[in-house]
Amino acid sequence: MRWRWRLGKGTRLVLGAICICYLLLLMIFQTRLTKTDGPDYPDGQDEKKGLLQQQGGRGGQPRQQIARPQKPKGFPVQPQDFCEGQGARREFSFVKVWQNALMYSAFWDGRHNDFDNAHNATWLRIMTILPSGRRLKRRVVSCLFQIDGKYVTSELQYYEMCENHNKDYGGYILSCQVPEEIKQRPCSVMVQEGSTPNPDGTTRIPVYSTDQRSLRYKYGICVSPVFGSVDPRKLVEFIELSRLLGAEKITFYDANISNGLKALLKYYEEQGLVQSVPWLLDSSIAKRIWYHGQLVALQDCLYRNMGSVDMVAINDIDEFIIPRRHTLWVDWYNDTTAQAQYAGYSFRSTFFPPKAGRGDHFLMTVQNDHRTSQVNRVRNKVMTYPSRVFEIGIHHISKPVLARLQVLPVSETDVLLHHYRSCSSSYMQDCSNITKDDRIKRIYGTQLEELTLQALKDLNIDL
């Protein structure tokens, strides 16, 4: 006789439910295992831009190779950066307002501070070049606004930037308070001489937003104006190594560079990594202001990135902020404490003289693997929170928005600025003692070479 097991309807339902629960638990377990394969970066950084997947502990080699960054989404230039309407313009250029006065950009600034905005008004900050120090004959200049068909003026307040180096011309931030009736940022602001409204005698300056945006970047770099003869291979190396370190947006100021370099920056602009801003100063002023108007460009860059980048580093193309115990900037940053009390971080530097390298490699940062033993405590560079700073300096944070905000000096055992240039004792530096430092070669060298070679191939640039 053959026996058959017959299950009742209720029993079949119970067994089916048990199978479904088992499958769900299995899926959840697999998901949790997958999630722990890499670091849990804030704001989805582990999925964004294909950066380094995992580092091998403090001071160790990375467990996995740095992945080639994926093509990012690009920069949000509308509607935050530009707007349509009277006075709107998309090009960037200096505007001559009066004799020896050049204005470049204006920013809508509603941040609370403890020097001119304790009552939470809104101000326009205009980046301006004027005769510096005692050379300036201050005149009454105003912003002109139209309210309910009537014109009203708001007088501009002068603030001279702190690193004009006693040159004939220097950088200024001119500020006017926005009338309470105006709630939305205009496309442009009219600037006039005098305090009596004179709409026929005005010059329009485009106004850009500093409001926080939904599409944000964790780390950016502001690069001083690029001019003269620049080796395109060094520029590619700078961009690729900066990207490996964690930079997601790099802003360059084009001070009349060659067509080849323009094409190079365009290549990275199309990837969403670079923003190239025209910086065409009249030659008569460019020779009489510090480093092609470097300070004004950095100020413009700080405010330009205020709404879209959490932290901005101030760099030249021969400088790199290198973590010593970590591989990525984000990993170093996550190890810092009491972040809310700081306006930014200051990094000590060391020189990698060109003749000190031992080897023959086309990458500057791999070839030059010897540096000065002494760490320089004068020529520091900074990484800052743009939203917490009113004025940025070349080597320091000049003025936070609140006096209580501090700048944290970072130990050279945690982060060190690599400066690839000849050493000079005028920088209070001992240039005689040299030590080997091949960290970049060991940690980043292989992939940096691959990325640089690919970019040079794409750009048809020979080694």
Image (cartoon, helix red, strand yellow):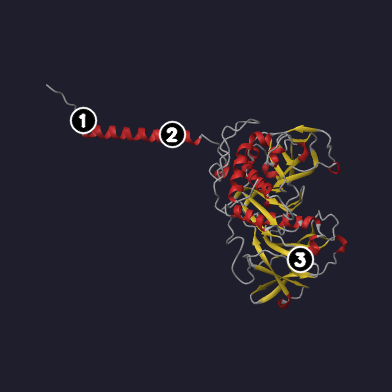
- Disc 2 to disc 1, C-alpha distance: 32 Å
Indicate left or right for 303 with 422 as reference: left
Mark drawn on residue 7 = 1
Which SS class for mark 2? Answer: helix
Q: Which residue is most to the right?
A: 134
Q: Earlier in the sequence, mark 3 or mark 2?
A: 2
Q: Quadrant of residue 162?
A: bottom right
What amino acid is labelled 2 in the image? Gln
Judge depth for marks 3 and 1 and give the one in front: 3
- Classify mark 2: residues with Cα within 10 Å, few (<14), some (14-19) or many (20+): few
Residue identifier under label 2: 30
Q: Quadrant of residue 14?
A: top left
Q: Earlier in the sequence, mark 2 or mark 1?
A: 1
- Disc 3 to disc 2, C-alpha distance: 61 Å
- Classify mark 3: residues with Cα within 10 Å, few (<14), some (14-19) or many (20+): many
Residue 226: give x, y in percent of width and height: 72, 54
- Disc 3 to disc 1, C-alpha distance: 90 Å
What amino acid is labelled 3 in the image? Leu
Q: How many marks?
A: 3
Residue 152: give x, y in percent of width and height: 71, 73
Residue identifier under label 3: 102
Q: Earlier in the sequence, mark 3 or mark 1?
A: 1
Of residues 247 and 142, which is closer to you in this image? 247
Q: From what the image shows, is residue 110 above or below residue 151?
A: above
Q: Is residue 37 visible?
A: yes
Mark drawn on residue 37 = none
Judge depth for marks 3 and 2 and give the one in front: 3
Residue 372: give x, y in percent of width and height: 79, 36
Which SS class for mark 3? Answer: strand
